[in-house]
Image: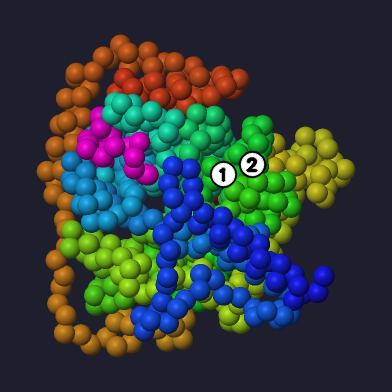
Amino acid sequence: MAKAEEIAAGRARWQARYDAARAPRQGRGAAAPEPRTTLSGQPVDPVYGPPPGADVPGFERIGWPGEFPFTRGLYPTGYRGRPWTIRQFAGFGNAHQTNERYRMILASGGGGLSVAFDMPTLMGYDSDAAMALGEVGHCGVAVDSAADMDVLFDGIPLDETTTSMTVSGPAIPVFCMYLVAAERQGADITTLNGTLQTDIFKEYIAQKEWLYPPEPHLRLIGDLMEYCTENIPAFKPLSVSGYHIREAGATAAQELAFTLADGFGYVELGLSRGLDVNKLARGLSFFFDAHIDFFEEIAKFRAARRIWARWMRDRFGATDDRAMWLRFHTQTAGVSLTAQQPYNNVVRTAVEALSAVLGGTNSLHTNALDETLALPTATSAEIALRTQQVIMEETGVVNVADPLGGSYYVEALTDRLEEEAERIFERIERMGAAKEAERAERAGGGAAATGRDAAEHAIGPITSGILAGIENGWFTSEIAESAFQYQQALEKDEKRIVGVNCHTSTITGEVETLRISHEVEEEQKRVLAERRAKRDQAAVDAALADLLDAVRDPARPNLIPVILQAARVEATLGEICGTMGQEFGTYTEDPRL
């Protein structure tokens, strides 16, 4: 079949999918006709592509929305079928204060919640721990036990609200506390929908917030994947995060490659647990940064979908389209914001948000203008929310699926980023092969354990390469080098930031900021002490003892039910994490890094 005929056949397939998506469904009629026009009244088609009879070499890599390789998006209707979810990241002070912010976000048009936890929570500490001093409630909300989750979601039905939680090291006990809060609301937890970050690889690569060595974390993550697949199928137990990798100084290609490699590692983990790839892959989502280089970011998102679809089909054997879908949340780049002339940050955030939308994001958080100075005020949070709503309601970008598809520039950038990512994947696999060859030689395998066979880690070859790159500092050094090169470019005026190294004069003064008082920490500690005094201590002791026994037994089928029981009796986060740490130990990064 000639290229022109293939393109025509693809358009026909797209039209059939589009019509099916708009057809009447059981219990309701057909979707209302949606004549879309430009602001000037010109009619707008739902998708655009090559004209009839055109021959476009390589068009199969671009394709049509809703069709493999999903370069142009997951859905044939684009945002006409459903716009992206407005999911504003929020959390500060105590659970009462954050609950008020969540209610404001939902009342103002937010489509879901995204929980920011404070540093003690992210590190698995209770608010009264010595290491928590001065940090309680400052960069997110403090959560010490399931009772805090009750307050955090008071008046917010968890079986009707999608919730994302940005936490990795102590993700599993925090998730169990969330499940307990849902149970106490009377919700059927099997119907819950949302996302838990849980991505421990990116902690070792970039953010540096881990609790244990990698292998125990992978055991916990494998347990969570099994539990959610079997019991809470709509909830995504893993959000593979490139955001923190990019914020640490990575390039767009590094963010793309390191993130997808981590995703491949988690697929290997699920497969090693005997999970069906078509089920486990549907439980993965992704979290990317939308940086300031507009077209590069759009190309990055498109390349990510294409790479993921191809690897899932060709490498891991997925046959279900949904298992090949790369669903992702985007947050605008915090690192692009400046303390100088902070009102400029509104513009930066709008540009970055638009790139995420044109790249086909499934949900989006927009940063507030004052986040380089403090936590967002209610006013700046509303401006950030309204930024998304202006894009959604006024710009017309929801009218056409992948409106930049076929752009010479965007397609060239997409191809280039994909090529760079593939080179990085090859490097990661080589590191894994070398690591396994060295391990085999130490075990007596000698020279026979070389090449691809040497890369067969207990979980998988990509996992082996990731662990090798963490151990030898390769990921950290690659990101550090990229950050250094960018900083040099700024200092040489080869790259410019308005208000920082150009256009520095201003008439604006200081902006009002939100400050968390010391009383928040004192109150959180007081409430925690009261809860400890009122709980059934014998039940807590028994639950923690059972947890320690389970952790010490490698044959224990799954740790989630045991942790869930500890959360039900109000064991604290620090107690649960500390109990597991007795067996799992701690991890210290090589000081040479």
Contact flag, marks 2 and 1 (Cβ < 8 Å): yes
Residues drawn in magenta: 142-163
- Alpha-carbon distance for marks 2 and 1? 7 Å
* Rendered position, 339 above or below 69: below
417 with respect to 574 (left or right)? right
Badge number at residue 278: 2
Q: Whole-percent x and y of residue 267?
A: 62, 44
Residue where numbered disc 1 is placed: 282
171 with respect to 555 (left or right)? left
Task: Name the magenta segment's main secondary structure.
Answer: loop
Q: Whole-percent x and y of residue 252?
A: 53, 68
Question: Residue at coordinates 57% horizontally, 22% vertically from top-left?
Answer: 557
Q: Is residue 111 visible?
A: yes
Question: Residue at coordinates 39% horizontally, 55% vertically from top-left?
Answer: 85
Q: Secondary structure at mark 1?
A: helix
Question: Residue at coordinates 46% horizontally, 54% vertically from top-left?
Answer: 30
- Please tell me whether residue 159 belongs to the stretch shown in magenta: yes
Question: How many numbered marks have been drawn onto this rendered protein structure?
Answer: 2
Q: Quadrant of residue 195?
A: top left
Q: Secondary structure at mark 2?
A: helix
Q: Residues within 10 Å of mark 2 (few under 14, many from 20)?
A: some
* Rendered position, 474 above or below 463: below
Between 590 and 364, which is closer to the camera in this rendering? Answer: 364
Q: Amino acid at mark 1?
A: Arg
Q: Amino acid at mark 2?
A: Asn
* Rendered position, 64 above or below 452: below
